[in-house]
């Protein structure tokens, strides 16, 4: 493992990597994999997904080594890991992971805009919920806010479980679309911050 490596050492390693040097790749991997894992874990809190993200970042680095022009390897790798984590968050359909990641990490690393972004996100979610048709809003709130199962909701509202699932799918899809521009804004700010 490398000790006391600076940007010049990274540039040398990257130059060797561009020539296909396996040892340079291994040195870069050993130096940065844990930091990238921590970066992803702060946003996702899911060990398996974070390992996948780190693997994807390094696979992409290897596959694109000849076309990349990197002046700061550490910044590039951390930005790539943050981008992959935010991309994963935006794709999540699992309600618990999605809501936890959204509430706790959407503005991670964006110190000056942190409160503004969080308030804006909460406002968008509240507006979205209020704008839902009454039945869909009730199902959405019962499932995501009250943490009730679709079977329980179906029984309580005298609906089929399939109807409840369809209403949740429709509402969740619409919410993701509504929040897309906010995620895009966060990703752009994260990239610009570490440029």
Image (spheres, grey):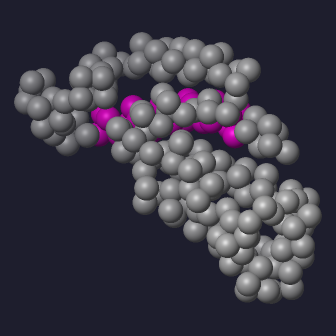
Residue at x 73%, y 39% (from the top left corner):
190
Q: Does the stretch in magenta take in 179?
A: yes
Q: Name the image quarter holding residue 28.
A: bottom right
Q: Does the stretch in magenta take in 185?
A: yes
Q: Is residue 42 above or below residue 2?
A: above
Q: Main secondary structure of the magenta part?
A: helix
Q: Is residue 118 above or below residue 88?
A: above
Residue 154 lies left or right of residue 98; in this view the side is left
Residue at x 43%, y 60% (from the top left corner):
48
Residue at x 42%, y 33% (from the top left corner):
99
Q: Quadrant of the N terminus?
A: bottom right
| x, y percent for residue 111 | 70, 25
Q: Which residues are magenta?
A: 166-187
Q: Quadrant of the C terminus?
A: top right
Residue 182 lies left or right of residue 14; in this view the side is left
Q: Nearer the viewer, residue 36 or 68?
A: 36
């Amino acid at each position: 493992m490398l000790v006391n490596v600076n940007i010049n050492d990274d540039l040398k390693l990257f130059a060797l990597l561009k020539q296909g040097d396996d040892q340079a790749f291994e040195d870069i991997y050993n130096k940065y994999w844990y930091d990238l894992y921590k970066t992803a874990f702060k946003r996702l809190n899911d060990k398996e997904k974070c390992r996948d993200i780190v693997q994807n970042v390094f696979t992409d680095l290897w596959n694109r080594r000849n076309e990349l022009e990197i002046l700061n390897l550490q910044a590039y790798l951390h930005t790539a890991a943050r981008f992959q984590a935010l991309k994963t968050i935006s794709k999540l359909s699992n309600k618990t992971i999605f809501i936890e990641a959204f509430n706790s990490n959407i503005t991670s690393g964006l110190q000056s805009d942190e409160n503004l972004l969080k308030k804006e996100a909460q406002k968008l979610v509240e507006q979205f919920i209020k704008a839902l048709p009454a039945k869909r809003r009730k199902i959405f709130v019962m499932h995501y806010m009250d943490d009730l199962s679709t079977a329980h909701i179906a029984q309580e509202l005298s609906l089929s479980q399939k109807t409840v699932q369809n209403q949740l799918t429709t509402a969740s899809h619409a919410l993701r679309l509504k929040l897309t521009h906010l995620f895009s804004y966060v990703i752009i700010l994260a990239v610009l911050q570490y440029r």
